[in-house]
Image (spheres, rainbow, N blue to C red):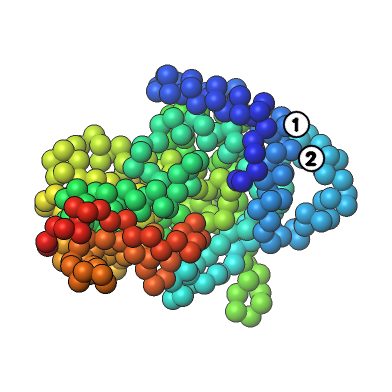
Amino acid sequence: MSLATPERIRTLQRALYVKAKQEPTRRFHFLYDKVWRDDILAHAFALSRANGGAPGVDGETFARIEGYGVERWLGELREEIRTGRYKPQPVRRVMIPKASGVGQRPLGIPTIRDRVVETAATLVLEPIFEADFDAAAYGYRPKRGALDAVRAVHLAIDEGHTEVVDADVSKYFDTIPHSALLRCVARRISDGKMLHLIKMWLKAPVEETDERGHRRMSGGKKATRGTPQGGVASPLLANIYMHRFIKAFRKHGLDARYGAVLVTYADDFVVLCRHDAAEVLDTIRRWMASIGLALNEDKTRVCNARRESFDFLGYTFGPMYSPRTGGRYNGARPSRHARFDERGGETERWTSRRAQQRKT
């Protein structure tokens, strides 16, 4: 979302954030009517237009909407939402190459109509949950990103947190339990219409084309897990559910007991410990199972950053050698297969004199 947010919307968002921050147990009720507010829908359309993207199952394009008349189109959508007639259409699923170049991953493409409504709802909901989110979470959040997470990891290593749990949640977006996620949302949201809206997105059917070109449907009302990768509201919902894990990390005091620093980016995370990282990993496995998730064991391991390297968010961390002095130090450099466009062409190594001078 790169367009400037209109001042009236920013005023609403600030008010929601402040109220949520001041009252950690408050549940918000009158929210649904904000979704169909004219200025919010118009901004949601502008954001969706700026982000572009392929058409959904209905084949609707931005060019066609503009030919029809954006104000007219938004007015009709507004009435659907206001009167409760709005229902999401199926999500079109396509397979796209993974950033690593190995294998593919599914991407859900909602219709433009659904993208606009999801964006409008996210504009209203995000400030409330931002008031709760932990500083350890960097993914899909305002004014935070992958490079901030990379810097946090390097700083932790530089300060001696070198026993590392390098972890990945197995098929996170596909396995988030709907009922548990909705309970997490309901801890802050009591507006039944808003909760129903979110539930409809989670239960939207998925349309995909098989190898023979035949269309097939999956998901729908019987689905109990998953939020589509590609859905506008999915990153926020994913962060809300991952917050359960982060809260457990804080509640049980792993940071104090193991000198552990947690850094998360959506379903990727690392825990940088001063000692006993293997014990931390065992604890995390149990927590994940208790909330209906599992670690991807092929991508999860314990290592010591003084002796071994590991990859996180497009960077490789670990022992390196200075081309100028030949000295060994703990550092970070862009990995061979960068996963985040946010990194761009930056090749800076976050190192300090202390890290370069320390012998490992």
Can I make out residue 181 in this image?
no
Residue corresponding to mark 1: 38
- Compared across the picture, whether 85 is left or right of 224 comes to right
Q: Which is more N-terminal, label 2 or label 1?
A: 1
Residue 317 position (above or below residue 25) = below
- Compared across the picture, whether 9 is left or right of 314 comes to right
- Compared across the picture, whether 147 is left or right of 34 comes to left
Tell whether label 2 touches label 1 (CB within 8 Å).
yes
Could you tell me which residue is drawn at 40 percent across and 31 percent down? 132
In this view, the residue in front, 349 or 221, is 349
Q: Looking at the rendered structure, which numbered label has been put on residue 185?
A: none
Q: Residues within 10 Å of mark 1 (few under 14, many from 20)?
A: some
Amino acid beneath label 1: Asp
* Residue 13, image quadrant: top right
Q: Which x, y percent locates residue 216?
A: 62, 67
Residue corresponding to mark 2: 74
Residue ranking furthest to the right: 68
Count of all numbered marks drawn on residues in the image: 2
Q: Which x, y percent locates residue 86?
A: 71, 40
Considering the numbered disc 2 on the image, is that residue within a helix, a strand or a loop?
A: helix
Q: Residues within 10 Å of mark 2 (few under 14, many from 20)?
A: some
Could you tell me which residue is drawn at 58 percent across and 48 percent down? 232
